[in-house]
Image (spheres, rainbow, N blue to C red):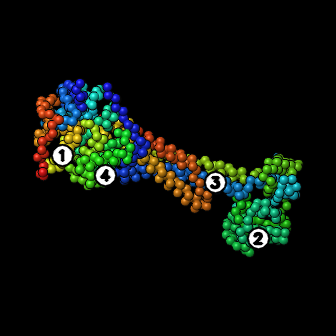
Amino acid sequence: MTEPYVVELRDVTKVYAGNVQALRGVDLAVGGGELLAIVGPSGSGKSTMLHMIGTLDRPTSGTVRIAGHDVADLSDRELSALRAHHLGFVFQRFHLAPGMTALDNVADGLLYTGIPLRARRERAAAALERVRLGHRLGHRPEQLSGGEQQRVAVARAVAGDPPLLLADEPTGNLDSAAGAEVLRVLRDLHAAGTTIAVITHDMEIAGWCPRQVRVRDGRIVADEGSGRRAPAEITIGARE
Amino acid sequence: MTRRPAPARLSPSDVLRVGAAGLRTRPTRVILSALGIAIGIATMIAVIGISSSSREELLRQLDRLGTNMLTVSAGQTLFGEEAKLPVDAAAMVRRVGPVRTAAATGSVEATVRRTDQIPEAVTGGISVQAATVDLLTTLEGRVVKGTWLNAATEQRPAVVLGSKAAERLGITRTGVQVWMGDRWFTVIGILGPMPLAPEIERSALIGFPAAEKHLGFDGHPTTIYERSAEESVEAVRAVLPRTVNPENPEEVNVSRPSDALAARAAAAGAFTNLLLGLGGVALLVGGVGVANTMVISVLERRKEIGLRRSLGATRGQVRVQFLAESLLLSALGGIAGSVLGALATIGYALSRDWPPVVPPWAIGGAIGATLLVGTVAGLYPAMRAARLSPTVALATT
Ligand SMILES: Nc1ncnc2c1ncn2[C@@H]1O[C@H](COP(=O)(O)OP(=O)(O)OP(=O)(O)O)[C@@H](O)[C@H]1O
Ligand SMILES: [Mg+2]
């Protein structure tokens, strides 16, 4: 018997109001520990696909299975719980609370997991250590660079050790050096066994990932490579 | 089959923390919208507090003055004429068993003026009364200047002025002369306030013998003041008319002056409804302010809501967060308002020499009203926040 997929999309379509067909029948299977890039031009349906995988929205038709759960079988409450325990999100914008320290921002990410405050803080400190921000625990977002802020956001997403990390244009707001820092963090997480899907329209970043899923007009047009392999050297960015 | 995922509960302290987090970053707005609630609550607490303080003062006064005094006065005859009390009425009252002291006053047909130059019609509302020597002890009154009448001075043209009478005549010391009837009387004393006998405050008092000798007084008392043991007041009250006027007991009026004070105390407890209503309106406006702030807060924080949903917050948890924020906001106003209202009560009461009283039930009511306002004001914004779809919330620019 094979290991169940972490993500399984079967003939998924999504039609928005106004008959906008964002997804037109997507099949995708992601196994545990994979690192994959979802690439495609603007408006091709990448974010929509990520919302399906992240259970933030339900498909118009087709099946979405996340960590073995059929999303259609779960209530909104149960989907929330699934996100709290199984999923981490990183967005193009960092969504950090202003005026709150990096530590508290990350600890707040564990609020809905039922972990008590002290343990949340401890885990947050460990997560910030993992994204190499152990020396910035008490800094507020406005005291951090864009790259550092995005790493705080990554720390928040992975503090609860979710098996699946979803990143939508995580380097979209960063210069290449800061983007490279974020990629390094993703590489380390992947090496530690986290399944990661990165949305990007940056071909360089896509090429860096061991597996590339190409999307166009709401369909997957190519699926190359194996997500289990280690990613390429990080050659993007001024340094290293 | 994998277990169905179940959301974790937020601990009460976590609910408080997320509720407060939204307020911490917008202090000006928080203060302004809590201010409305604070004004409403402060008004209501102050209105209740001040009227309770005034009531407490009246009750203490009543306690101090005692409720064991009765007054007997001449009523009217069957033919509608002014009745008179018998000359020895006070002595008869003194003979009633439980009666401790009794004194009499009688209206004298005369006026009191600073000089004989002032026309007789200008009385200043001051009446001239003959008084027995034991009047002061019966009323438990006090002389603030000079002395009270005694066996010697009650014979002579000497007068003791009630507090209001002295004030109206502009007399602040003894030894001066006043014109009464058609001769000079010497002021030998000025009395303090008499809350149970305000008519004495407005009187110029002379001895019975002097009144008869100098002003043609007929010696019939018009009012008898009497004090008995507290527990026999009702019994004494029942026998007084027959004692004073055995032939025509129906022409005699008996009253208990402390009843008027007691009635005022009871009335003071019934608040000035208009002010209380104003406080209610202010509270309502404050509530609308909080609701408005919350609606804006939800609109501004769509991204935060989307993020929290992606972190695993259920709709209920988002709702609870904004309800907690609204409750905290109005509780802040409620607490500030209670403190302000209590301070206003204390300040006002102390300035009038009243004992400051802020009833605990008023504070309890204020807290209840605050929580109600916070809930009602937060309900709609919280529902809107919870209904927001995570993807739409995250897509907000
Ligand atoms: N909530 C929505 N309502 C209506 N149409 C939507 C909605 N969200 C997305 N769309 C449309 O669906 C299509 C796919 O959008 P999506 O955001 O998935 O594209 P994308 O590949 O992420 O593009 P980009 O690279 O610009 O982020 C687009 O045509 C978009 O206009
Ligand atoms: Mg997109």
> Which mark is on residue A184?
1
In the picture of the structure, the residue carrying the numbered disc 3 is B56
Marks 4/1: CA distance? 23 Å
Q: In the picture, which quadrant includes the N terminus of chain B?
A: top left
Question: Which subunit holds the residue at mark 4?
Answer: A
- Res. B68 visible in picture: yes
Marks 3/2: CA distance? 33 Å
Q: Residue at x 68, y 71 (%)?
A: B172
Q: Can marks 3 and 2 be said to lie on one chain? A: yes
- Res. A166 visible in picture: no
Classify mark 2: helix, strand or loop: loop
Give the percent coordinates (x, y) of residue A43.
16, 35
Classify mark 3: helix, strand or loop: helix
In the picture of the structure, the residue carrying the numbered disc 2 is B147
Q: What amino acid is found at the position of numbered circle 3 in the picture?
A: Glu
In the picture of the structure, the residue carrying the numbered disc 4 is A101
For the image, the number of numbered tags is 4
Q: Nearer the viewer, residue B76 or B15?
A: B15
Question: Which subunit holds the residue at mark 3?
Answer: B
Earlier sequence position, callout 3 versus callout 2: 3
Q: What amino acid is found at the position of numbered circle 1 in the picture?
A: Arg
